[in-house]
Image: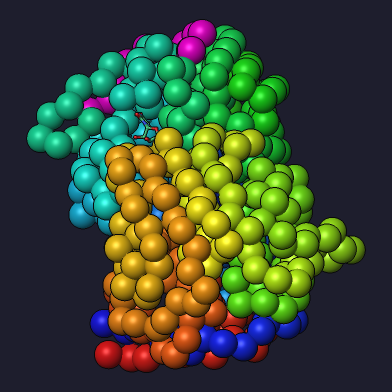
Amino acid sequence: MDSIVVTGGGELRGEIPIAGAKNACLALMPATLLSEEPLTLTNAPRLSDIKTMTTLLQSLGAEAASLQDGQVLAMSSHDLTSTRADYDIVRKMRASNLVLGPLIARHGHAEVSLPGGCAIGARPMDLHIFGLEKLGAEIDLRDGYLHAKAPNGLKGAEIPLTFASVGATENIVMAATLAKGTTVLTNAAREPEIVDLVQCLRAMGAQIEGEGTSRIEIQGVDRLHGATHAVVADRIELGTYMLAPAIAGGEVECLGGRLDLVGAFVEKLDAAGIAVEETARGLRVSRKNGRIRAVDVTTEPFPGFPTDLQAQMMAMLCTAEGTSELNETIFENRFMHAPELTRMGARIEVHGGKARVTGVNKLRGAPVMATDLRASVSLILAGLAAEGETVVSRVYHLDRGYEHVVRKLRGVGAQVERVKA
Ligand code: UD1
């Protein structure tokens, strides 16, 4: 298995291009199942999760080709040969469950494996099921699969979510585009990836209002047509690379970065003493003089602080002046990076969903192991300012969500290399 070796110490200077959002792309790709006509996505990120979704769509009989070095995805679901999302694919990636809503809406039935456990928590699908049942789907769980059918088609409904789940909102919105009548989804997720999905569905002919607010109204239409859509910038990749100069010192411009995608995160950077400035091409981040200041962070649904940046933020706070409290409210088991950071000299105490980080002057490089995608990158970030060498193993997690991570960090002067096993 490959590992990434980081030699800490130097300041970072230069530019990092931000890719299209993994999480937006993973919701946009299944939207192809809603139409007989082709859907083309541009600005797609080159990631193994995108390949997994491509394989899943192909297993259903859709055409899905990756063009222009992977930045364009050309898909067509004219003739589907299957409506079954197999366990072998779904277990690799939970977002596979986003084919459920589109398949029931267009084909009247679907069999989708339950994703099973995930390193960061239980992650059930009850809200997806609740919403789709409200639309008239009948869903049973047998043999580890959700068997869903809608023999009489889907009908618009009022759907109050008890939690603003991103995936449930995406599945329900996609299904409702082809339902008869009006669907009103309340307590909907407001993430930029939902806004991006709705913009694409609208380009395909869907009638939707309210994306980006907690009330989304969908007027069902008989059919959707083809479209071409550019994937929104990845706010999590953006936040991750904004933390690189914050941790290591220096100044980096993140090309394609937008303040509206990372507002709550930037407020915390500001409180920690990190300067962020909008430029014509993105966001420029620099470390002001002196040590980083401790800040308290609570993860929340958008527009709050994203859980997907919590591990990386913790890496920065390990060397802050003072004690920071991190409160993880979205996933119950998302501090697995803490013991690894501790191996690098960090002082972290975890109690349930809360972590207290007392800043130390310097971290020291160590061999560490990543347990999930965001944890892996947090260890690389920590290594950038640590004394000596940090070797991060199990980097296949990184390939799921960060394209060319080594090339991007080397481009701003970091000493990072990937070592083949
Ligand atoms: C998406 C993102 C993921 C991010 C998460 C929260 C994708 C592909 N992944 O995941 O990177 O960390 O949003 O911002 O977009 N829940 C239920 N029942 C459900 C669904 C969810 O209880 O039916 C709970 C989950 O267990 C979790 C919380 O809701 O505690 C958030 O989950 P959700 O917003 O659905 O996240 P995902 O869509 O899985």
Image quadrant occupied by the N terminus: bottom left
Q: Is residue 29 shown above or below 158?
A: below
Q: Quadrant of residue 279?
A: bottom right
Is residue 274 among what the camera can see?
A: yes
For the point 51% across and 51% down, the residue is: 324
Image coordinates of residue 345 in percent, x first then y, are 38, 73
For the point 28% across and 16% down, the residue is: 138
Is residue 66 among what the camera can see?
A: no
Q: Image check: 273 left or right of 138?
A: right
Region of the chain picked out in magenta, as a range: 147-160
Q: Is residue 399 shown above or below 135?
A: below
Q: Is residue 226 shown above or below 276?
A: above
The answer to whether residue 150 is magenta is yes
Image coordinates of residue 165 in percent, x first then y, are 46, 30
Nearer to the camera, 118 or 309: 309
Image quadrant occupied by the C terminus: bottom left
The answer to whether residue 289 is magenta is no
